[in-house]
Image (cartoon, rainbow, N blue to C red):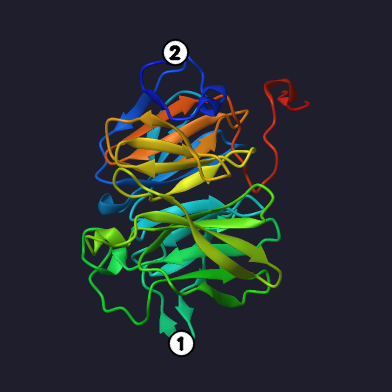
Amino acid sequence: MQYPDGYIVDDVRFTSLILPNAQLERLWSGGRWCEGPVYDPAGRYLLWSDIPNDRTLRYDECDGHVAVFRQPAAFGNGQTRDREGRLITCEHGSRSVTRTEHNGRITTLADRFEGHRLNSPNDVTVKSDGSIWFTDPSYGIDGDYEGGLRDAEMGCHVYCLTPEHRLVRVADDFEKPNGLAFSPDEAWLYVSDTGATHRDDGPRHIRRFRVESNHRLSGGEVFAVSSNGLFDGFRLDLAGNLWTSASDGVHCYAPDGTRLGRIVVPETVANVCFGGISRNRLYICATTSLYALHLNTRGHDVLGEPVGPSEIRAPER
């Protein structure tokens, strides 16, 4: 069977997730290393990080305009929103996780563990109970390009900031923990390890953990191994399919670990997120550029189920 250009089908189940007439769009270019996309459904805009340029950019979904949202940006990387819609950011420069309040003030949520400075928080996700989970590799302190050269005070771990503001180390057996995301039912936490950046035979895979009560994890078996480059950031759709970055594009995995297919992108992909009115538009941060593609599936989001076009109405006067 002939499938549209730009897709590689590894399993026939992938065909139900893609749209034959939807094409990959390059929305903007001009970055150095684009990362950390996060969508705002109320404002219908996307924020993303251009780490080496120390800025956060903003794409307006309504008119296609791109502007600088924040510069300097403390070499911000991964971003998400909490249950109140506030922006949560991993900052290499401040070696912290911060929250942007509704009035614009920036609050530091975590910058130390047991008296030691964090390395450079990388990616972050929020659970429905309000807890904030993030990874802390050393990329932002390994040099000045994406942060500042500093000494590490501890290893590279995965953390949870509980609703009571208690910082818990939930995994300590990673080389370079990177992207992370929950399954839609929050029974599983997926975390990538990009240790191959520092060691030729280092990990280039995603692991899957069972989420236990009291903000603990168990298990941690390898879920998928990258066949092309590294798995950096990823997101899941409502069916539990995992859409992850790779050197040749975006790879899609079923919950059973089968690779379903690939979206070919002309630049190395760093991270993705779902957006749009129905949350069926996949935004892709790839090296210098921002891309987007409409899919036949909807993204999972901690803020709740996406709304459909019929549910959008003008405000009452």
* Amino acid on which disc 2 is placed: Met
Residue that badge 2 annotates:
1
Front disc: 2 or 1: 2
Residue 38 seen in this snapshot: yes
Residue 286 - label: none
Q: Which residue is mark 1?
A: 115
Mark 1: which amino acid? Gly
In what quadrant of the picture does the C terminus appear? top right
The kind of secondary structure element at disc 1 is loop
Classify mark 2: residues with Cα within 10 Å, few (<14), some (14-19) or many (20+).
Answer: few
Q: Nearer the viewer, residue 28 or 296?
A: 296
Can you give x and y, in whole percent of width and height, for residue 34 in the image? Answer: 33, 44
Which image quadrant for residue 9? top left
Q: Give the x, y percent position of residue 191.
A: 48, 58
Q: Secondary structure at mark 2?
A: loop
| The N terminus, quarter of image | top left
Q: Quick check: 168 above or below 9?
A: below
- Mark 2 or 1 closer to N-term? 2
What number of labels is visible?
A: 2
Viewer can see residue 104? no
Q: 3 above or below 228?
A: above
Where residue 243 sits: x, y (%)? 48, 40
Query: Hey, which residue is sitting farthest right in the picture?
Result: 316
* Neighbourhood count class around disc 1 (C-alpha, 10 Å): few under 14, some 14–19, many 20 upward: few
Q: Is residue 163 left or right of residue 276?
A: right
